[in-house]
Structure formats: structure tokens, C-alpha cells
Image (cartoon, helix red, strand yellow):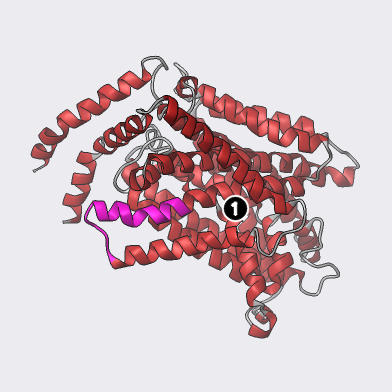
Amino acid sequence: MKRNINNATESQQGGAREIAAEEQSNCGPGLRERSLGPWAVLGQSIANIGASGAPLISIPVVASIAGPGTWLSFLIATAGIVLVALNINAFACDSSGTASLNDYIARSLGPTAGVLGGWALAIAYIGCGAACIPLFASYLNNLVAPLHVHFSPLVFSVGLLAIVWYCAWKDMRLSAHLMLSIEFSAMAVGIALAAAILFKQGRHVDLSQFQLHNLSVSAIGLGSVLAFMATVGFESAASLGDEAKSPLQSIPRAIVASSIIAGFYFILHAYAMVAGFRGLSTTLADSQAPVLDVARAHGVTILALLLTVAGLVSCVSIVLACVNAGARTLFLLAQHGVLPSAFRRVHAKNRTPGVAINAASLVILLVSAPLIVAGVPARDIWGYAGSVCTFGFLTAYLLIAIGTPFHLHSKGRLKTWNVLVSVLASLVVLVPFIASVYPVPPFPQNLMIYIFAGLILFGMGWFLLLRIRRPGIVNEIELHLDNNYDRFAIERAAQSDAAL
């Protein structure tokens, strides 16, 4: 049977290779195919989430709203991202490619929706990088504050971006293994800190976090919106579809595994930190250095210092993941003819999308540097840029959730539970959108949704102009989608045989 499959698909794959060769004729060699193992693919998603920094920023922010229900807010957010992951995997088990989330949206909802998703993801990854860049100097200055030393946030932010740019430009394999090592090491320190806090409190359970009279449904709901924003990025393994080994297995596993691993870490730390601050003179929401404060109170300051150092280093991995994913999104948009062909040029030796990496790094700097120079605190920059980038992620997730039933129906695999998962994921994603406009957030947070909308309108306006000037661009995108899907005919058939 496998011999028959090979014969039947040989001409299809040959045609796909010819198309790919023609696309790359003026852009150098392609990306380094099948070079990343499953751990490296997992590292991309884990790093993009940046869970190791949760105790330093996102958990205190959620706690300021949800209070003792902080852990429950993160539990709801984790359930939401797992639902989205299941929708993504309905596509990822069929085909893959560079920045394949765009292709999944385009295949199910059409090329225009695919461009919308691609533009939203480009905003998301670049905005996420801009949000995290200033945290590097902030963590460093907190670390050396007892020595009465202060480093320039702009200088260190530029330095961090230079390191990130070099790693992304040099070798994706180097980037992936570096990200995985940094994030897992940082998370190990974080788990040790949470365990130490809980151990110092004895064996009793902090019942106040489970008693209904202490929990507010509305506060937990709003907290879950912010918690959901802290967990985005788990899907970025899909940006490595051409570079991953066995992508139809490694990418779906990485997407689900990263969402569950990060979710567990968030929930553990949310419970431990709320419990750890009970009885202290300051609250978790009001603390300027929550990790150090709770650690000193429980006699484990050394772990807090280690976690701060880990958070400092993890800024490298988060921004690196954003540059890698953002550059590959720009790379795919250029392959679809939406951006200039220069963006799909690949470095002859490094086999990385050099021009796209340069562009993503430069935009991150142009967004973050003026805010740093203006003296905007790192936490505020994280909040502003983080909100805009989160809307980008949510837009792509919503399109994926809506498109999943259409994709499965076209393949004859749609089941009732697929529709249920799609509806639940769509509702989960819509909640943060609604909460961002009602009730109206305080200034300037209320402007973030409109900044995102403006960027989306600019991108889609550009695409509509291209459609007028090049009426065949939609057909070109569809041909690219068909050829990319056909490349995986043998692997899909092999999976089907294995399932039988």
C-alpha cells in the first residue's frame, strides 16, 4: 500500500518542489529543512510564553484583581489555551510549513482571512518582543539596587536586542536549544521557590483560596482575561514547520505540551505566592518586588535572587522566540506576495530569513526605545505593548477556532465534539476582546484596542490595494497552499495506516 501511495503522490511532490524552487530562485537557498528535533520545537513555544517570568510580573498583576481567586483565573486561562491548541492541532496533524498558522487560516477561511491572520500574528510577535525588551534592564536594576548602582535601560535594552538578533540570524538550531535551556532552568528555580514557600508554611492548605465567600466571580473572570494574555505564544512552534523534523508529530505535541506545562507553572505560583503573602505587612498586588518580599519573609532569599537572575536571562529567550516567529511570519507573507520579495531572502550560509529577522528586530527597537527614553516604567511598557500584541494573538486564535469545523468538514472528519471545542474556544477568545472595551479601561490602556485596530486596517488596506493592482494574487496564494498541503500526502497516509 505504501508503494502505491508513493507512486500516486510522486508527481504532486515533484510539482511542489518545482514551485518552491521557482519561489527561491531570486532569494537564495531555502530555510534549513528538518533540522530541529522535538525538544527544539518545544523550546520555541515554551520560550514564547515566557512562563518563568510569571512570578515577577503577570501573577502580581492578576492578583491585584482576582485576589485569592488568582489560581482559578489561571486555571480558566489554561483551559482556554488548551481548547485553542486542540483547534490548531486539527490542522497541524495534516500539514505544516513556515508560519503555518497563517496557512491554516487561509485554507479554512480563504486567502484574505489568511492575510488578516498573518498580519495579526506579525503584530503579536513583534509587539511581544517590544513588551519584554525593557524588562531586562528593570530586572537587572532591581538585582543591583542594594549596591546603589543603576544601569541605563536604553543601553541594556539595545544590548539585549543585539544578542537576540545575532542568535536569530546565525542559526535557528542555536536559538532553539538556547531558549529551551534558559526557560527550563528558570522554571526549575521557580518551582523550587514555590515549593520552599509552601514547605515553610507547613502541611496545611490555604483554605481562603478555595472558600466561596472569598471569591468574586466577576474578579476571577476579569483576572482570567489578564491570565489568558500571559499565556499566549504557545502556538509559535507552528512557525517552524519547514525546519522541524517530523513536523506532523513534533509540532502538535509541542503546542499541547507547552500550554499544559506553562499552565501548571502559572497555577502553582499563583497559589504559592498568594499563600506566601498572607499575613505580611504588604500585599502581593502592592509589592514592588513581590518575589524578593515573599522570599525574605520565608527565609529563602537566595531562591528569589536566583529567580530574578533567571527572569533576567529569560528575557533573552522570550525576545528571541518573538524575533524568530515574527521573522518567519513576515517571510511567509512575502512568499504570498503580500510583502516585498526581499523579506523571503534566506542567508546562504546560515539558512535563516535574514532580511525578515533584521526587520522584526528593528521594529521591536523602534517601538520600545521611544517609550524607554520617555521614562515610561518597564511594567507600563509591558502592559501597553503586551495588550496590543495580545489582541494579535487573540485574532489569530479566533480565526483558527472559527475555521476548524470548515477544515474538518472539507476532509470528511467533522464530529460533534469538534464543533463544541470550536465554539468553546471562540467564546474564550472573545471574552478578552469584550473586556478590553467594556467597561472602558482607564487611559491610556483604553487606546490599545484602537491602536491594534489601526494596524490591522493598515495591513488589510495594503492587501486590498495589492488585489486591485494584481488580481491574480489570491490565486497565487491558493496555489501555494495547495502545493504545501500536497507535500505531506505520504505522511498523512502513513499516519492513517498507523491509526488502523
Q: Is residue 119 left or right of residue 480?
A: right
Q: Is residue 438 above or below residue 485?
A: below
* Placement of 469 over or under 43, stated as above or below: above
Image x and y of residue 284, in percent? 77, 65
The three-letter amino acid code for the residue at tag 1 is: Ala
Q: Which residue is mark 1?
A: 51
Count of numbered tags: 1
The answer to whether any part of residue 240 appears in the image is: yes
The C terminus - image quarter: bottom left
In the figure, is residue 4 to the left or right of 375? left
Which secondary structure is most common in the magenta stretch?
A: helix
Per the rendered image, the range of residues in magenta is 398-415
> How would you rate the neighbour count of disc 1 (Cα within 10 Å): few for under 14, some for 14-19, many for 20 or more?
many
| The N terminus sits in image quarter | top left
Q: Residue at x 25, y 28 (%)?
A: 16
Residue 119: x percent and y percent?
51, 39
